[in-house]
Structure formats: structure tokens, C-alpha cells
Image (spheres, grey):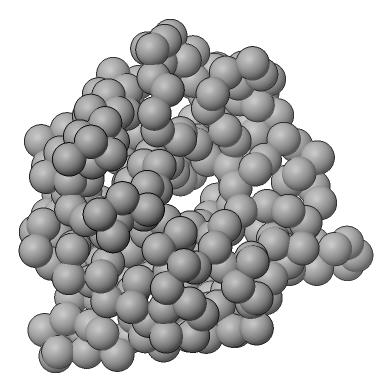
């Protein structure tokens, strides 16, 4: 820790959502790889669809980019047609798994109990969960932002010990900012990130809360990334739309690299 600041490595994570067939995925990941030459100060992950995990994973061998999945089921194996277990993700080469994305909560009725089971199951298989939380525009307007986030964090992380907590990644993704081109302001993002860190500190410890990385997600792009990433409690970005173009995603990584060096030397 330096001047009371934990030296958390910035983390830039791509969520490709339901995009790319094999050829497109290969082109995209090659484009990203080719532009990553000198990056060393930030962590990078891409989460493609399940169907291209293996082919993208093969492209990532001997690179610094890690593989993640966009979802996972909490059972180990069995009669769960259509689902993918944590062990299968590990077998496919994944290190990370996104859990509780607002699109899954909204379209697939995922609730905090399922999210919690998925986080636990991921941890048990040594995957690093990226737990997504965020309020809707209605909830923000009604002044319920912190209540909603508090519930999502408390229920989502129920029963997880301090050791596992400190390796975890949280993504604050205001639902109204996802895919809308309307990102949170730096003040809104910093306020929520500091709040989330404080909630984590209350049920764990200051050390754990300072170690947890909290990413911002919601229309992050090369125009707003520098300001967002420079905030004290913003430790990276979960990028949707802007991760589907190699050049844009690489620019975000380069910006993060600069901000990382600045944050550690300020
Ligand atoms: C996301 O879905 O995780 C996301 C942040 O999307 P976008 O960057 O397109 O807003």
C-alpha cells in the first residue's frame, strides 16, 4: 500500500456477449493480440461466447491475455440441459467468469441467490468470478441506488471467506449505462465504487476491501476511459461494445497502461 492506496493492478475485461462466429472471433483476437506488444502493467481478459472459447483460447497461448466466460452454472455435472459447469470452463482454458450480468438478471431471471451459488461454484473450481452489480435508471431516480447495490453485494457474496473475497473482481455496471452510449460520470462512478468498497470492508476487513478490484462497466470508450480509470476506486473496466473492435479495445488497454503507471507513481 502506498500513501494509503492499495496498488491494485488495473484490469481491462472484454465481454463479447452473443457476438462472433469462429472466423470473426479469430480475426478479432488476432487483431487484439497484434496490438498488445508492449503492455505489461495491466491485466487483460476477453470473454467470448462459449462456442469459441477453445479457438480463442488457442490464440491466447503464450500471451498475457486471459480467457473468461460470460456465465456458468453452479452444479458440477448432470441433467442440466444447456448449462456449462465451472469444471468445463477450466477445461476450456478459462481463468475468469462473469457472473450476474444485468442482461442475465433481466432476460434470464437470475436472482441474487443463483448469483451467489454461481460465485461459490466458480471459486470452488479456482475460477475468478467477476460479480456484476448495478442499479436501473428507475432505481437511481427513486434514490434506491445504494440500497439495490447493498443487497446485490451482500446476497451475492454471502458465505464467502476473506481469502476468496480478496481475489474476487466486482463490476459496477449501472444498467442505464450499458450499451446506451451514456456512461456514468466520474463522480457517480467514484461515489459508487467507494461505497461498494466500504460495504465489503464492513463484512470483511480493510485489507480485503483494498485488495478487491472494482471495475466500471457501461459505455466505457477511449473518450471517457482515462477520467474513469483515474478515479481512486475504479480499478479497470468491463467493456462491451467497445471490445468488439480490436483497435478500440487496444486503445483502452493502452490508456489503462498509462493510468496504471500514473496511479502507482503519484
Ligand atoms: C457490458 O455489457 O458489460 C457493458 C459494459 O457493455 P457496454 O460497454 O456496451 O456498455
Residue 75 percent across, percent down from the top left: 80, 68
Q: Residue furthest front?
A: 3
Residue at image coords 46%, 59%:
211
Q: Is residue 136 above or below residue 143?
A: above
Residue at image coords 18%, 75%:
137
Residue 132 percent across, percent down from the top left: 43, 64
Residue 220 percent across, percent down from the top left: 22, 45
Q: Is residue 53 left or right of residue 195?
A: right
Q: Quadrant of the C terminus?
A: top left
Q: Is residue 96 above or below residue 201?
A: above
Residue at image coords 42%, 10%:
37
Number of labels in the image equals 0
Residue 264 percent across, percent down from the top left: 28, 39
Residue at image coords 65%, 83%:
159
Choose top left, top right, bottom left or bottom right for residue 253: top left
Q: Residue furthest right?
A: 78
- 220 or 161: nearer the viewer: 161
- 136 or 161: nearer the viewer: 161
- The reply to whether residue 22 is in sight is no
Amino acid at each position: 500500500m502506498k500513501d494509503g492506496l492499495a496498488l491494485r493492478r488495473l484490469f481491462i475485461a472484454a465481454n463479447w456477449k452473443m457476438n462472433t462466429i469462429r472466423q470473426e472471433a479469430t480475426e478479432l483476437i488476432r487483431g487484439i493480440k497484434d496490438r498488445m506488444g508492449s503492455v505489461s502493467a495491466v491485466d487483460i481478459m476477453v470473454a467470448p461466447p462459449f462456442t469459441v472459447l477453445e479457438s480463442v483460447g488457442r490464440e491466447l497461448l503464450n500471451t498475457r491475455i486471459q480467457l473468461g466466460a460470460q456465465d456458468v452454472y453452479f452444479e458440477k455435472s448432470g441433467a442440466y440441459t444447456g448449462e456449462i459447469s465451472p469444471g468445463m470452463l477450466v477445461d476450456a482454458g478459462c481463468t475468469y467468469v462473469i457472473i450476474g450480468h444485468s442482461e442475465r438478471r433481466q432476460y434470464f431471471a437470475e436472482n441474487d441467490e443463483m448469483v451467489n451459488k454461481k460465485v461459490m461454484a466458480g471459486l470452488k473450481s479456482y475460477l475468478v468470478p467477476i460479480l456484476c452489480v448495478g442499479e436501473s435508471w428507475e432505481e437511481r431516480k427513486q434514490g434506491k441506488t445504494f440500497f439495490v447495490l447493498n443487497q446485490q453485494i451482500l446476497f451475492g457474496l454471502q458465505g464467502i471467506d476473506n481469502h476468496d473475497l480478496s481475489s474476487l473482481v466486482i463490476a459496477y455496471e449501472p444498467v442505464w449505462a450499458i450499451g446506451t452510449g451514456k456512461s456514468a460520470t466520474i463522480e457517480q462512478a467514484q461515489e459508487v465504487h467507494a461505497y461498494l468498497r466500504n460495504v465489503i470492508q464492513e463484512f470483511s476487513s480493510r485489507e480485503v476491501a483494498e485488495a478487491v478490484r472494482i471495475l466500471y462497466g457501461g459505455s466505457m470508450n477511449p473518450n471517457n476511459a482515462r477520467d474513469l480509470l483515474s478515479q481512486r476506486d475504479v480499478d479497470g473496466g468491463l467493456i462491451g461494445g467497445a471490445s468488439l473492435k480490436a483497435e478500440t479495445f487496444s486503445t483502452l488497454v493502452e490508456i489503462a497502461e498509462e493510468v496504471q503507471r500514473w496511479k502507482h507513481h503519484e
